[in-house]
Amino acid sequence: MRSVGFLIIAIVFAFILTAGKTSAQSVSGTAVKSAIENYVKQSLPVSEETVLEFKDLKESYPVSFGGYHLSVSSANSVTLKGLVTFLVKARPASGKNLSQIIPVTVKIRTFESALVTTKMIQPHGAITSDEVASVRTETTDLPNPVTSLSQLNGKWTSRWVQEGKALTFDMFDDMPIVKRGDDVTIIYKTKNIIVRDQGSALQDGRLNDVIRVTNEYKDNLRAKVIGKDEVVLMN
């Protein structure tokens, strides 16, 4: 009888092990890769060509359920460029309230047509068509590349830009609408009176900048730029 009891225990134990093995499920690395690729393709503009380099993709990921749906979110990137950690959520197809997060690190390299300088560019000048060319280039490490001259309307360079450099928006400032030496209309406002006088700008100024101006009576007046060659005197 004792031997029969041991045999039954052994059979039960073997059944538990077998059940554990047969119930083990996994999500294939291929499915995870495909889900991330589709997410990136749908998230980036059509004009951007992408190359995805998977850094830690595994052949499979064990999960505690069979049949699954995958959804993807980005954990640490808004622009989807450079090294990005994706969180792939696996949920059972049965609709049970279960899920498992699979983190995957990917380097996303982007390529698009950007404006590249064909000569050295001086600061405080508007870019012209003969100074740039549209070139298909890698933009992975470029913050906000300029892709069209129309994007630079009303802007000028804030610094020297070397020949062969891809243009990015941080190289530009809004162009002043009042320039040093320009004749300006100086507006004086009181509670009940508005007076206009002619003067001269002593500084460049963009819209809403406070600059120094002068008129025939006084130098170094402080005035706010409110329009083209028009300023209002500060109290």
Image (spheres, grey):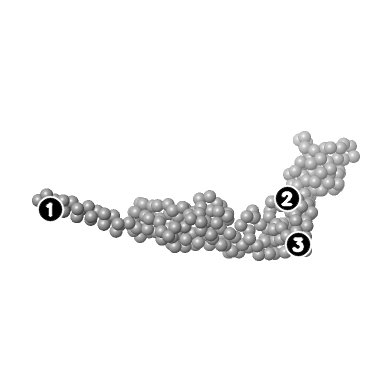
Q: For mark 3, what is the residue?
A: 118
| Image marks 3 and 2: residues in contact by CB distance under 8 Å | no
- Of callouts 2 and 1, the N-terminal one: 1
Image check: 210 left or right of 40? right
Determine whether the residue tagged by mark 3 lies in a helix, strand or loop. Answer: loop
| SS label for mark 2 | strand
Kindly identify the amino acid type of the residue bearing the numbered disc 3. Answer: Thr
- Secondary element under disc 1, as helix, strand or loop, is helix
Residue at position x 12%, y 53% from top? 4
Above or below for 97 versus 202: below
Residue 50 spot, x, y in % from top left: 57, 62
The answer to which of marks 3 and 1 sits earlier in the sequence is 1
Check disc 1 and report the residue beneath it. Answer: 4
Q: Is residue 188 visible?
A: no
Q: Mark 2 points at which residue?
A: 173
The correct choice, above or below, for 21 with respect to 218 in the image is below
Q: Do the residues labelled 2 and 1 touch (CB within 8 Å)?
A: no
The structure residue drawn at horizontal position 59% and vertical position 64%, both measured from the top left corner, is: 49
Which image quarter is the C terminus in?
Answer: top right
Residue closer to the observer: 189 or 139: 139
Q: Badge 1, how many Cα within 10 Å: few under 14, some, many 20+?
A: few
Which residue occupies the foreground of this view, 45 or 231?
45
Instruction: Give the x, y percent position of residue 193.
Output: 79, 38
Residue under the point 82% across and 37% down: 221
